[in-house]
């Protein structure tokens, strides 16, 4: 495996200073040869756009080659997502059926009891998940909810699962409280580019989202942040989203790339389908510009055929949400995922549970193991 990985890596141009041959034999700067396994935080839009413009097979080959330098290409991390508080959200996110502003027929449900959440987490663990994500339809949590949330975190961690929550915007003290309870990841997506953002959401700003990510980092939690494609944005907006994520001071450890799930009653219900190849290109470019991150296939997999999902794995996706439901929308059934994994020779990523020599027990982290 090591020989194969090194051989593949040697075939991939790693610098914009490399040259290429024109059809006439002239040497010229290879403007598109900017794919690198080096972690960068200075990506320019024209560089990311040049990656998107590569021939499809060239782009996927580069992404897969870089992927192999940091991950087992035949392992996928499995997460399960549970809606712990559903509906009645005051935000106006144009894609979201949980907003009070849209009539989607969704039933509002109060914050779940801790025991019920832990029971769901145990079922997810038994089905093969290694991370349990809990989502609440809030603009931001109330301080009075924090004792319940911290009890959920503690209960899920006792099962040996990694924990993740998405609760909206956080104050500094709330982020610290969640971190102190042992929350491993906090999800807060940027959704789209700064330029297109106001076409999708008006009730909070892009800066609000970036500030929340800063607070999560400052509290010591890992970041899960990505976006949604197929919302009517153009190619430049997909470039802009990935530039924002890749140029954060630290790359998100987890980068969910969602395909829009069109829900009747929301403003985006009639949005046209995004070309599946464009979706796979987005996965591949995300892998290249954030080489150490887990890139996750998230919402929208219900509408993807096996071929699209397989291409996404080839392009560097190495995480999925597993189970029949993502918050309030459908997801491929678990047995279908396992059947596809078997056909592709993919195994669920296993986590390290043995205690390291000089620290408390922790979960498997690909980035940490690479640096060890």
Image: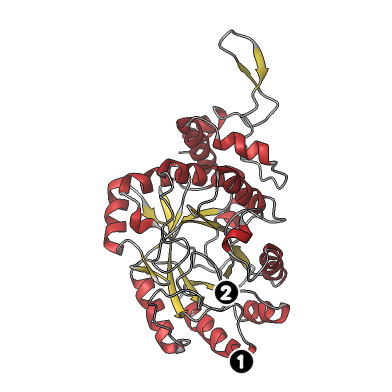
Single out the residue that lies furthest toward the top.
24
* Quadrant of the snapshot with the C terminus: bottom right
Does residue 114 appear in the picture of this structure?
A: yes
Instruction: Please tell me the numbered disc located at residue 91.
Output: 2
Residue 196, compared with residue 44, is above or below; it is below
SS category of the residue bearing label 1: helix
Q: Neighbour class for label 2 at 10 Å: few (<14), some, many (≥20)?
A: some
Q: Is residue 232 above or below residue 236?
A: below
181 relative to 265 in the view: left or right: right
Percent x, y of residue 240: 63, 48
Q: Is residue 25 left or right of residue 334?
A: right
Residue situated in front as seen by the camera: 11 or 62: 62
Q: Nearer the viewer, residue 356 or 9?
A: 9
Lateral position of residue 296 relative to residue 24, left or right: left
Is 134 situated above or below 47?
below
Occupied quadrant, residue 126: bottom left
Residue for point 64% across, 55% down: 251
Q: Quadrant of the N terminus?
A: top left
Label 2, secondary structure: give it: loop
1 or 2: tag closer to the N-terminus: 2
Residue at which label 1 appears: 144
User: For the residues marked 1 and 2, what is the alpha-carbon distance in whole angstroms?
Assistant: 20 Å
Query: In the image, residue 111 lies at what x, y percent?
Result: 48, 87
Q: Nearer the viewer, residue 10 or 61?
A: 61
Q: Is residue 372 visible?
A: no
Q: Position of residue 321 (x, y in %)?
A: 42, 62
**Residue name at image x 72 percent, y 69 percent:** 218
- The quarter holding residue 335 reads bottom left
Image spot of residue 220 (x, y percent): 68, 70
Q: Residue at x 53, y 83 (%)?
A: 154
């Amino acid at each position: 495996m090591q020989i194969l990985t090194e051989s593949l890596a040697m075939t991939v141009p790693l610098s914009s200073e490399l040259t290429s041959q024109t059809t006439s034999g002239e040497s010229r700067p290879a403007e598109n040869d900017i794919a690198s396994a080096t972690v960068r935080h200075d990506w320019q839009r024209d560089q990311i756009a040049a990656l998107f413009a590569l021939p499809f097979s060239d782009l996927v080959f580069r992404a897969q080659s870089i992927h192999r330098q940091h991950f087992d290409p035949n392992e996928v991390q499995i997460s399960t997502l549970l809606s712990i508080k559903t509906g009645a959200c005051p935000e106006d996110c144009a894609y979201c059926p949980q907003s009070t502003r849209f009539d989607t027929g969704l039933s509002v449900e109060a914050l779940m009891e801790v025991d019920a959440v832990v029971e769901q987490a145990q079922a997810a663990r038994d089905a093969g998940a290694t991370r349990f994500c809990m989502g609440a339809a809030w603009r931001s949590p109330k301080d009075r909810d924090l004792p319940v949330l911290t009890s959920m975190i503690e209960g899920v961690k006792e099962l040996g699962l990694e924990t993740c929550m998405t609760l909206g915007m956080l104050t500094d003290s709330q982020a610290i409280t969640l971190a102190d309870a042992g929350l491993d990841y906090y999800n807060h997506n940027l959704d789209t580019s700064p330029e297109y953002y106001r076409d999708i959401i008006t009730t909070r700003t892009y800066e609000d989202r970036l500030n929340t990510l800063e607070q999560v980092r400052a509290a010591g939690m890992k970041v899960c942040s990505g976006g949604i494609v197929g919302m009517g944005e153009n190619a430049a907006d997909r470039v802009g989203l990935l530039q924002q994520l890749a140029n954060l001071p630290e790359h998100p450890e987890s980068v969910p790339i969602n395909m829009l799930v069109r829900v009747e009653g929301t403003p985006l219900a009639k949005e046209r389908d995004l070309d599946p190849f464009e979706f796979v290109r987005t996965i591949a470019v995300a892998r290249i510009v954030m080489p150490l991150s887990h890139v996750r296939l998230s919402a929208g997999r219900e509408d993807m055929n096996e071929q699209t999902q397989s291409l996404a794995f080839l392009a560097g996706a190495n995480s999925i949400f597993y189970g029949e439901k993502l918050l309030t929308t459908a997801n491929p059934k678990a047995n279908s995922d396992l059947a596809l994994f078997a056909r592709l020779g993919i195994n669920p990523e296993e986590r390290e549970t043995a205690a390291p020599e000089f620290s408390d027990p922790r979960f498997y982290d690909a980035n940490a193991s690479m640096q060890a």
